[in-house]
């Protein structure tokens, strides 16, 4: 577990570039897939991800707390309502859904590699340090929240 090196949106963009590159210029054609629903599912995932991210940011702004991912210790409020009842990290889930939408859009299973790397990097360099900072700042309130709400959606 290390400290964040790059902000999550940069990791997201690098991962999106990775999905595109392994699905386009560096694609292995044997890993291509195509389904009549791919486009619709990709659009739905992308829209769901975007909506989730916007709602999450709006909740932070409403509570007048920081959305800056590199400085969780600057949080002035613990946001536990709304979308934060389903996941402790809706902004990262947002990015994950958009990356999965890109994999479907480009239609190559190899695109799941950068998505997996994104999840691991965010988990180790962002989420775990955030959790420590929030536990230090909000104590038992955060630990109780952490015990009842999953980190992503299921874990």
Image: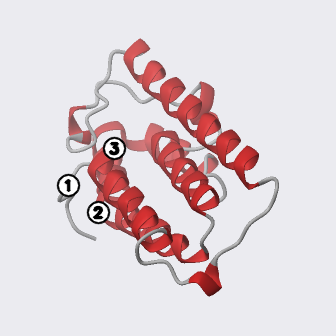
Horizontal and vertical percent position of residue 5 = 17, 59
Q: Can you tell which quarter of the image residue 52 is in?
A: top right
Vertical comparison of 67 with 70: above or below: above
Horizontal and vertical percent position of residue 43 = 66, 41
**Quadrant (top left/top right/bottom left/bottom right) for the C terminus:** bottom right
Residue mark closest to the camera, 1 vs 3: 1
Horizontal and vertical percent position of residue 50 = 54, 34
* C-alpha span from label 2 to label 3: 15 Å
* C-alpha span from label 1 to label 3: 19 Å
Circle number at residue 125: 2
Q: Label 1 neighbourhood size at 10 Å, few (<14), some (14-19), many (20+)?
A: few
Instruction: Tell which circle, 2 or 3, labels the residue nearer the N-terminal end.
Output: 2
Residue mark closest to the camera, 1 vs 2: 1
SS for dot 1:
loop
The mark total stands at 3
Q: Label 2 neighbourhood size at 10 Å, few (<14), some (14-19), many (20+)?
A: some
**Quadrant (top left/top right/bottom left/bottom right) for the N terminus:** bottom left
Judge by depth and name the residue closer to the eye, 131 or 86: 86
**Would residue 112 be seen by someone viewing this image from the given angle?**
yes
Q: Is residue 69 left or right of residue 21?
A: left
Vertical comparison of 33 with 64: above or below: below
Residue mark closest to the camera, 2 vs 3: 2
Task: Read off the residue under disc 3.
Answer: 134
SS for dot 3:
helix
Q: Residue at x 54, y 77 (%)?
A: 110
SS for dot 2:
helix
Circle number at residue 6: 1
* C-alpha span from label 1 to label 2: 9 Å
Q: Is residue 39 left or right of residue 67?
A: right
Q: Residue at x 75, y 44 (%)?
A: 40
Q: Are marks 1 and 3 in contact (CB under 8 Å)?
A: no
């Amino acid at each position: 577990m290390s400290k964040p090196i790059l902000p999550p949106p940069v990791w997201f963009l690098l991962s999106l570039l990775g999905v595109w590159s392994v699905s386009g210029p560096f694609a292995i054609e044997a890993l291509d897939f195509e389904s009549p629903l791919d486009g619709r599912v990709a659009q739905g995932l992308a829209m769901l991800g975007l909506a989730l991210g916007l709602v999450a940011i709006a909740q932070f702004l409403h509570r007048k707390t920081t959305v800056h991912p590199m400085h969780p210790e600057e949080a002035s409020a613990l946001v536990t309502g709304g979308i934060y009842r389903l996941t402790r990290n809706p902004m990262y889930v947002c990015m994950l859904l958009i990356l999965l939408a890109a994999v479907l859009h480009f239609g190559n299973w190899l695109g799941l590699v950068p998505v997996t790397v994104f999840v691991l990097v965010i988990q180790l360099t962002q989420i775990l340090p955030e959790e420590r900072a929030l536990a230090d700042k909000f104590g038992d309130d955060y630990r109780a929240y952490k015990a009842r709400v999953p980190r992503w959606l299921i874990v």
